[in-house]
Image (spheres, grey):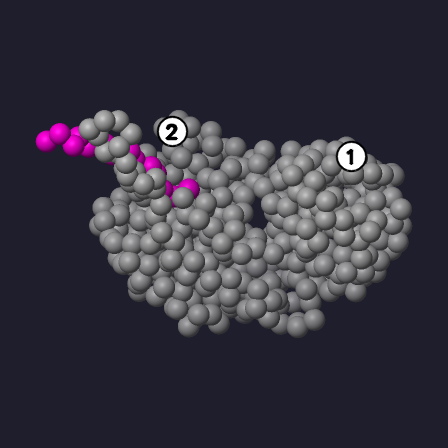
Amino acid sequence: MSTELRRLRNYIDGEFRDAADGRTTEVVNPATGEAYATAPLSGQTDVDAAMAAAAAAFPAWRDATPAERQKALLKIADAFEERAEDLIAAEVENTGKPIGLTRSEEIPPMVDQIRFFAGAARMLEGRSAGEYMDGLTSFVRREPVGVCAQVAPWNYPMMMAVWKFAPAIAAGNTVVLKPSDTTPASTVLIADIIGSVLPKGVFNVICGDRDTGRMMVEHPTPAMASITGSVRAGMSVAESASKDLKRVHLELGGKAPVVVFEDTDIAKAVEDISVAGFFNAGQDCTAATRVLVQESIHDEFVAALAKAASETRTGQPDDEDVLYGPLNNPNQLKQVAGFIERLPAHAKVVAGGHQVGEKGYFYAPTVVAGLLQDDEIIQNEVFGPVITVQSFTDEQQALEYANGVEYALASSVWTKDHARAMRLSKALDFGCVWINTHIPLVAEMPHGGFKKSGYGKDLSAYGFDDYTRVKHVMTSLDV
């Protein structure tokens, strides 16, 4: 007996709508491999409608006072807390993540981040007014950029939606947000929550695939396009946006080096690194999945890491003993498995390396040692629960290996030597360097990378500034 699928809908100009042409796609729970909902497959008509709504709402929202925008965002944060269990349920269906960890690790930071940007709305900064030329006074206005086209990824659908809409709306912009086609449920629920607070048209959600995202970026209305996704997707967005010189905000892939020196507390480092590598099934651009270990402790470290992996569990969302759930979709499972299948002869799988279970897209915690710098699995992002280990001799070689990839999002250094930590924090070519920890993020500090990891910052005052533009105003004193 078939189960009727839940129908998700776009949210445009303050109301929920189906795609104009009625097209839909099935949405699959990755923990079961079974469809649970349908979502609109939005086309040009839907994109046009959402952009028109956002453009019509922009003048009034731009002119709202910072205090009014702050009040609205604080109401949204309160509503997120009140409907936390609904958000958790939607996100767990989206992703198959453990229920308990979604409750403890995602809801609190999301609420905190919304409240941070509520405060940022009242902290618009510019240089002080002054007379830089005789008889003339200059000052700076910091203004919203306009309509923002935003595309969120499937690894943290709920949290990345917050990272997108909160700074944009706080700064006075209006938003058209597209979730990933595999994870629309929590974003549609967010639209329902926000819809009771914001004026219609300020926040719009359209569901769809890559073509929908392309239509959004190529549309003439948005002043800015923001995407969190793959390097390939980011390059495509940058190319499309260049045709009419839209601003672009890109948070793309990562290949974080985790540099472990011989003076490190091995037991503590292994415990923290294994969690930072396997959390969320390694589906995190900042995940601690590329470990570089000084050769004098290499064998001991690999043995300890393999043991930690063997004791780490993946499984269904309601299992309180699992660290992570499934990979997001069958294509991602195939990609992760492909990296392991293509390993060179000199590589050795010391833990995991196989799919888990008969349903869903689960993959075992995996550790691969014996790797060389030019190996595919070292140079390319796996985005799965796979930690690689390389050996280095000294600080110079560690830096050479660490910086020797095309990504530059995050990194970490593990040592008791303060001077070494400071040298490495300067020399590592990554947007974030953690010292003796890996993966904590706070609303007050920026998140974003260099090189092929993209440009622009999420979180912090820097992330807020990215959604504003600077205008110089000069007035004559001789009137």
**Element assignment for label 1:** helix
Which residue is at 44% across, 70% downward? 81
473 within the magenta span: yes
Q: Answer few, some or many: residues within 10 Å of disc 1's Cα (few below 14, many 20 plus, some between 14 and 19).
A: few
Q: Is residue 139 left or right of residue 213?
A: left
Where disc 2 sits, the SS reads: loop
Q: Please state the extent of the stretch shown in magenta in the rendering.
A: 466-479
Q: Left or right of 276: which side holds 60?
A: left
- Crowding at dot 2, Cα within 10 Å, few <14 / some 14-19 / many 20+, comes out as few
Q: Which mark is residue 245?
A: 2
Residue marked by disc 1? 396
Residue 40's label in the rendered image is none
On the question of residue 266 being in view, the answer is yes
Amino acid bearing label 1: Gln
Q: Residue at x 81, y 60 (%)?
A: 267
**At 57% from the left edge and 68% from the top edge, which residue is drawn?**
104
Q: Position of residue 472 (x, y in %)?
A: 28, 33
Q: Earlier in the sequence, mark 1 or mark 2?
A: 2
